[in-house]
Amino acid sequence: MKTILIAGGTGLVGQLLAQTLKDEGYNIRLISRSKPANPIFPTFLWNVEKGVAYGNAFKEVDIVINLAGTGVADKLWTERRKKEITESRVKSNQLLAYCFKNYHRPALYLSAGAIGFYGDRDNEILTEEHAAGDDFLSKSCTAWENAVFETADHETRLVLFRIGIVLSPRGGALQKMLLPWKMGISTSFNPGNQWYSWIHEKDLVRLFLFAIQNEQVEGIYNAVAPNPEKMYDFAKAMNAQSKLPWRMVWSIPRKLLTTAMGEMSTVLTHSTRVSSEKIMSAGFQFTFKKMDEALKNLIG
């Protein structure tokens, strides 16, 4: 029975991933900044800022999964916050690199990445071969990926998933949109024709499991459903799940978004049309290929 160590295992994706992998028969450990009051899994402490982790966490570990990182959309992007977003990801990899070298090197290292790497690209269909954009998130993701590739060496199989917008009723973008939706308003963000590349939380977890179980999977893969949606169509797809007698789509002007959110508004207004062809060619089959199917499962 293989042992998996998950960094960031108490977050939105990490909780579901840890439980799914346990159900599949893996031994699960977590490494975290703090121990939960009633931990479900053995939890070890680390301090990314200080570069401190304990070797026992890595003892006889076969696989390490790194989901750790400061939330991108949790607070406004001050210069200090932007530094935290980037450094939390870079430093977690630097600490893991030290632990792999000095404690124990796993056979497989799985890391989260983000489609923010590509930046604002209008209608361009983006594959893993496309270059990074030139905005803050693109530069941050580039620094993040560089650190990931410095963490693993030729002895460790490396898989990096550039993750799209994760749809989950438990948190993230969808949860933020559900409050106005329940009041009869589906929120759209101008210009409305920007592409959103998304993935159902269960398919994302299945992608990690697929990479674990298929040794031919190696390198960078886009973790997005095969059918991205334009923002306005996303709002209309939410409407279709409504059981209320009426519903409207309220489109929030870009100027208002910029005033309220500053540079962070680009998370909502940028267009990123990302292809999932590479991971499907490797044999992965999505359960939720279309937005309406995903939303029906999550909120229907």
Image (cartoon, rainbow, N blue to C red):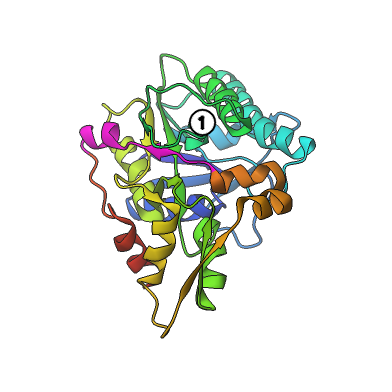
Relative depth, front residue between 298 and 263:
263
> Which residue is denoted by mark 1 in the rendering?
117
Residue 157 vertical position relative to residue 77 in the rendered view, above or below: above
Q: Residue furthest bottom?
A: 245
Kind of residue indicated by mark 1: Phe
Q: Which quadrant is home to the C terminus?
A: bottom left
The image quadrant of residue 274 is top left
Q: Give the quarter of the figure containing the N terminus.
A: top left
Rendered position, 105 above or below 83: above
> x and y percent of residue 272 in the render?
45, 39
Residue in view at x 66 percent, y 28 percent: 91
Q: Could you tell me how many numbered marks the image carries?
A: 1
Q: Can residue 29 be seen in this snapshot?
A: yes
Residue at x 43% of width, y 50% of height: 17
Where are the magenta residues, as a range? 270-283
Identity of the residue drawn at 61% across and 62% down: 38
**Apparent side of residue 91 relative to residue 24 in the rendered image (left or right):** right
Residue 53 appears in the figure: no
Please name whichever residue, 116 or 99, is drawn nearer the observer in this view of the structure.
Answer: 116
Please tell me whether residue 279 belongs to the stretch shown in magenta: yes
Mark 1: few, some, or many residues within 10 Å (few <14, many ≥20)? many
Image quarter of residue 222: top left
> x, y percentage for residue 73?
63, 49
> Was residue 57 drawn as part of the magenta stretch in this picture?
no
* Outermost residue, top side: 154
What percent of the width, then of the height, locates residue 225?
A: 33, 46
Q: Against 192, is 141 above or below?
A: above
Element under disc 1? helix
* Front one among 5 and 228: 228
Is residue 107 toward the left or the right of residue 68 in the image?
A: left
